[in-house]
Image (cartoon, rainbow, N blue to C red):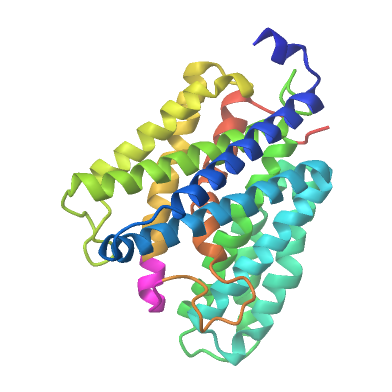
Amino acid sequence: MRWLKSLSSSEQVALLFVVLFGFLALLTITLFLHSLRERPEDVRAGTSRGWARTRRDLRAAWIGGCLFWMAWISGPLGATLLFAVFSFLGLREFITLVHTQRSDHRSLIVAFFVLLPAQYLICGARFFDLFAIFLPVYGFLVLPMVSALADDPQRFLERNAKIQWGVMLCVYGLSHAPALLLLDFPGFRGRGAFLLFFFVMVVATGQIAQELARRSLRRRPVARRISRSFSMRAWWTGALTGALVGALLYWITPFKPGQALVMAFLSAGSAGFGGLVMKALKRDAGVRYWGNRSSITGAVGLLDRIAVLCFAAPVFFHSVRWYFELPMRAP
């Protein structure tokens, strides 16, 4: 621990990526060697789906790790632009599947080319007071105004709610992830990558634990028509597992162990409920996965990867700012 503290902030973050990519490489090699083993035909057929899912998740982890590294080496500006691209692709995927009308085109132009860049511009400028309210207040008032100018009252409320929810999820929620890199903690400058890594690890671990609990506990679902696998016991398992991982990782953050435990519990818990809400949205849209094969968004399945982060990032960001009384305008 003393040796770690003696390193500069850049050396500490570089070591973080060495450990991260080393772990992914070891996992990839292990999976490859395991796939070379001969198995009976019936066993092979029964496990093919599981291995396909594992390979897909591992590939997503590699992509996420590389993008995380690119965000760090490009600095706060590059990270903000990178997440802005994610928001654009995610919002396009969402809008494609919820079926808008021709009269919504003006509102969509405003959402994609005015509100989205404005939100990330405010984020990059570190005006966190305006950043917190720009879309929920001004953005949500502007969109129905523009929609009303199209002179189409047919299902007006429903159409605007779809666009507003897409902006809230894909733009407002996800924009809080790069904002973590810009928080100004005394004595923690230059280490924002650790805070983002802490957040992603807590959410990912909580989701894995919740999925394992769903398969093993077999509890009665609380929302059967939305998800037959979501139960409160599984949610508690995921939230508490994420909290434990957060407490163990406190040393890479400006938090004390108890503070890291609470912040991690809030993040993992909100991510768990976020997954349930996304399932409800998919049920309503009549799709099983975001970005299915009929999608032409160019970002197939992106929302399935980032949805829980979109829910948890605002909770984590504003909880941290409120508890530690960080400045409204970072220097």
Instruction: Tell me if residue 81 comes above or below residue 7 in the rendering.
Output: below
Q: Quadrant of residue 179 in the image?
A: top right
Task: Provide the major secondary structure of the magenta segment.
Answer: helix
Q: Quadrant of residue 53 in the image?
A: bottom left
Instruction: Tell me if residue 285 comes above or below residue 301 in the rendering.
Output: below
63 displayed left or right of 14: left
Residue 236 at x, y = what percent?
Answer: 30, 38
The residue sitting at 28% across, 53% down in the picture is 230
The residue sitting at 49% across, 79% down in the picture is 98
Instruction: Tell me if residue 136 comes above or below residue 180 in the rendering.
Output: below
53 displayed left or right of 327: left
- Total numbered badges shown on the rendered structure: 0
Residue 184 at x, y = what percent?
Answer: 74, 29
Q: Quadrant of residue 255 in the image?
A: top right
Residue 328 in view, yes or no: no
Residue 120 at x, y = what percent?
Answer: 75, 55
Residue 292 in view, yes or no: yes
Q: Quadrant of the C terminus?
A: top right
> Quick one: 32 or 220, which is closer to the camera?
32
> Quick one: 294 or 84, which is closer to the camera?
294
Q: Is residue 283 magenta?
A: yes
The residue sitting at 56% across, 45% down in the picture is 29
> Quick one: 86 or 114, which is closer to the camera?
86
Q: Quadrant of the N terminus?
A: top right
* Highlighted magenta segment, given as a residue range: 280-288
